[in-house]
Image (cartoon, grey):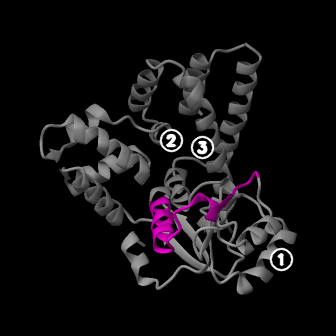
Amino acid sequence: MNLKSLSNYDNFYGCFILCGDTYLTSCAVDFIKQKMNITNSFDISIFDSENFSSNSIIESCEQVSFFTTNRLVIVKNVFQVLESDKKKLLEYIPKMNPTCTLLILDNMQVFDFLKCTKLNFTLTDIELVQETQRLAKEKGKSISKEDALYLANLVNKDLSSINTELEKLSMYTTNDTILKEDINSVVTKTDDVVVFELTTALGKKDANKTLNILFNLLKQDNQASKLLPLMSNNFTRLFTISVSKNLTDELLAQKLGVKPFAVTKLRSQLKNFNPVKLKNIVYEFCDVDYMIKSGLMQADTALIYIVEYILNI
């Protein structure tokens, strides 16, 4: 779904669940605010995991607006809902305040129990390329489909990060078109992307590529201490997926705390590992973590050790 699709809705009264790309969902919230003529912060309430409760949300939805006839309640970053809260929300939503809009930002499918309109801003690669080209055009630049996808992959297909990098690229290049060499000069791969590339190289037993990635990492201060827990989480997720034969990608995403497309990416790495090897690797990460915290091993040494272990297992 793209932002233009929102114009198909006559109004936004009631409950809506928004999921998908965080940049687009944020833009959708702004669009809905504008459509509902909500401009004052007094008419907006925001709930997250720290202050979430069904009673507070219901009370907020029922409040009288100060400056407009409409009210907006936003729920985000909630990772668990108690059964008692579920029951109250299920009872309330069908009869909620008709001048209130309740927006629930939910990539973890925590609120799937609600019977609300779902606005899904998950993008296919084709749509992601189109959005990237649109954002580049807004900045007075063009970018080819191939280079747009290359940029997207470098930042883990996050449109907010793509937008930020395009801002930098538009100031960096004097050409009308953003080229791959410009991207390589300006854009830094996200840690998640680096971990994915390193895991893939390790799975394929590609020692040359593994060492190339490793030595580039070790040139950067504190990079080893940042990447070790990310690598450990990645292999733990791989092991969980490998032994969870009966779970769908959506359920696994919820269980692992990631987006569904991340599960698809992880599955692509499973062909290079089996559950026994993954279990041993997870245990080895636990041992390495203990040695680092005990002062028996430095992070750089630990990263080299774990990479060598996985290559030879």
Question: What amino acid type is highlighted by mark number 3?
Answer: Asn
Q: Circle 3 sits on which residue?
A: 234
- Point out the tag, 3 or 1, that comes first from the N-terminus: 1
The x, y position of residue 129, in whole percent, is: 30, 59
The x, y position of residue 26, in whole percent, is: 49, 59
In the image, the segment drawn in magenta is 24-50
From mark 3 to mark 1, how far is it between C-alphas? 35 Å
Return the residue found at the far front: 67
The x, y position of residue 140, in whole percent, is: 19, 50
Q: Residue at x 29, y 33 (%)?
A: 186
**Left or right for 97, reference 20:** right
Instruction: Name the foreground residue: 8 vs 109.
Output: 8
Question: What amino acid type is highlighted by mark number 2?
Answer: Asp
The image quarter containing residue 307 is top right
Q: Quadrant of the C terminus?
A: top right
Q: Circle 1 sits on which residue?
A: 87
Return the residue found at the far left: 175
Residue 157 visible in the current orientation: no
Q: Circle 2 sits on which residue?
A: 192
Q: Disc 1 on helix, strand or loop?
A: helix
From mark 3 to mark 2, how far is it between C-alphas? 9 Å
Q: Disc 3 on helix, strand or loop?
A: helix
Measured along the vertical axis of the image, is residue 87 above or below residue 278? below
Q: Disc 2 on helix, strand or loop?
A: helix
The x, y position of residue 71, in whole percent, is: 62, 71
Q: Residues within 10 Å of mark 3 (few under 14, many from 20)?
A: some
Q: Are marks 3 and 2 in contact (CB under 8 Å)?
A: no
Measured along the vertical axis of the image, is residue 223 above or below residue 267? above
Q: Residues within 10 Å of mark 2 (few under 14, many from 20)?
A: some
Q: Quadrant of the N terminus?
A: bottom left
- Point out the tag, 3 or 2, that comes first from the N-terminus: 2
